[in-house]
Structures are given as structure tokens and as C-alpha cells.
Amino acid sequence: MSFSTIKKHIARCNQFLSEKLGATKGMDKGPDYKQLTQLIDSYKAFYEDVQKRVIDCLEPNPNARKRAWASAAVNKIQGNTNNENYPHAEGFLSDCFLEYGKQLSQQPGLSLALIQCGEAYNKIVESKNQSVDETKSGYLKPISEKLHRDIRKISVLRRKVENKRLTFAHRKNVLEKNAFTTNAHPDQAFEECRIQYEDSLAASTAAMSNFLDTEVEQIKTLSNFVNAQLSFYQDAARILSDLHGELEMRLLDACFSRNRLFSVSEILLITVHLNSNILFYHAKPSLHNYKFRLSIKGRMYCAAVRSVLLYVCET
């Protein structure tokens, strides 16, 4: 480091301390520049906060998240492409359903129902992993790039503006003090400091203005995040809806496999509308207390007999 550079650093430090202590008044960069810096600071705080919140939403357990990241880093070093996914709670629930579905194989109805639940929740985990990957690539990655590229570049330019301002302010104060004694005029060094300050201020202002003009791109990345979340919840709703229908069918089979007797009033209430056709269940007389036993014709869907099950199984 040359002696002139050391002198510049000392001059900046003296100017900074004098402004902080109130001995001199700092140069105003203008209200527009101040507003731009406030917006950039808000963007930086938003990016840092939303990164943390989105990751907490996708992968809520920090310990499991660190283990998954460490495993991915080790696999990357070793050249393995198979990365370990974050262990979602639905995955543990799926393993539980499948394990006890096998252990309770002596009760086929419940066993098959548990296995169906396990397979359904396994599909939910796959859909969630896909949603996490889409969110990381479509939302978190652009945010990280803006933080480490655009915001960092703007921060460097802002620090440069501040350094040039301190140097220019120091030169200006020295010139004003000497003007009372030696009637000094602005020299070449003063003009160079002024030009450097104005150029750095213009470059910083242009960089911040260009960054703020990317509103369309930022809304698009936010739309990518919402779209990934929407796809996951739609898939989860479809999977759970199909699972609910299968369980209602299994519940119907379990109810009628008990060979239950129904009264005449119960028989009259069993009317199912399916494909715009009204299907009636025929009854055969039983020898026990003038009750009837139902005979089911055809395969019934759970949505069509839900009202029947609610009435029959609760009585």
C-alpha cells in the first residue's frame, strides 16, 4: 500500500469521525438516492427473511435439514447423483401404515386398508419432494442469485460512493479552511475527487434503478413458488380423495360382510342415485323377527352409498 493511499484512508477516517461526532455536517446525496437505498435495504431484508421462511415451510425440522444437506454435500464430493431427500412426516406415517398393515394380515380388511393408506401417503411424499425441488429451482435459486450477485454488486457500489464522498468532503473542508488564510482555489486534486464522487454516485444510482426495474421478473418467481405449492396441494387432495373412496368401499364391504339384519324402515331409506339412475336394493325375508337381509347387486361406489353407511352403521 502506497503512502498516498494511506493518507486517503486517514483522511476518510478523520472525516467520518468528525461527522459522527457532530463537528462537521456530511454531504447530502439527495432524496432520490436516499429513497433508492431504503428500497434496496428492504429488498435485501425481504430476500434474507423469505429464504429462511420458505425453507422452514418446506423442511420444518432444522436438524433433519442439516443432515440432508450434509449427506448431499458428501454425495457431491464422492460423485454420487443419488441425494438423500428430506425425511417428511408423511413418509414416517406411510412406513407406519405399511408396517402394521403387514403385521395385521390376519384381519384382511384392516390390513388392506392400512396398506392402501401407506401407499397413498407415499405418493404424497413423492409429490412433496417434487414441489420442494420446483420451489428451490424456481424461487429460492433466483432469490439467492439476486442476493449474491445484484445486491452484493449494489452494496459494493454504495460503499464506493461513501468512500468517494468522504474523500471529497475532506478535500472540500480543507479547501474551505485554507480559503480564509491563503485565498486558495480548487486545485486539480479537488476536481478529481469531485468527478470521482459524481461518477460513483451515478453508477450506484443506475445499478439500484435497474434492479428495481425487475419487478416483472420478481413477480414471476413468486408465481413459480405459488404454482409449485398449488400443484402439491392439488395432488395431495386428489390422492386423499381417492384413498377416502377406497376406504369407504372397504367400509361398505366390512359392514355387509357381518351379515347384518335390517328393518323395513331401514330398507325404505336405502336409495342410491348413481349415473342418474335410481337403484333399489331388493330384500329377502328373514325368519327372525320379521327383518330383512339385504342382497347387493353390482359394484357400488363409495360416493353413492355414503348416506346409506352413515344411517346404517350408526344405528
Image (spheres, helix red, strand yellow):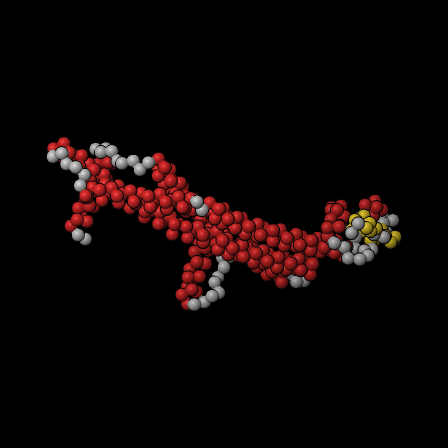
- Residue sitting at the far top: 180
Count the numbered circles shown. Answer: 0
Q: Is residue 148 left or right of residue 218?
A: left
Q: Nearer the viewer, residue 157 or 184?
A: 184
Q: Quadrant of the C terminus?
A: top right
Q: Nearer the viewer, residue 166 or 226?
A: 166
In the rendered image, the vertical position of residue 188 relative to residue 127, given as above or below: above
Question: Residue drawn 22% across and 42% down?
Answer: 191
Q: Is residue 1 visible?
A: yes
- Residue sitting at the far left: 182
Residue 162 horizontal/vertical position (percent): 28, 42
Question: Residue drawn 74% across and 54% down?
Answer: 301
Question: Residue drawn 26% across and 41% down?
Answer: 165
Question: Residue drawn 16% across and 37% down?
Answer: 185
Residue 212 horizontal/vertical position (percent): 42, 44
In the rendered image, the vertical position of residue 28 relative to residue 148, given as above or below: above
Q: Where is residue 187, by image quadrant? A: top left
Residue 169 horizontal/vertical position (percent): 23, 38
Q: Is residue 167 visible?
A: no
Q: Nearer the viewer, residue 8 or 270?
A: 8
Residue 283 horizontal/vertical position (percent): 85, 52
Q: Is residue 160 left or right of residue 232?
A: left
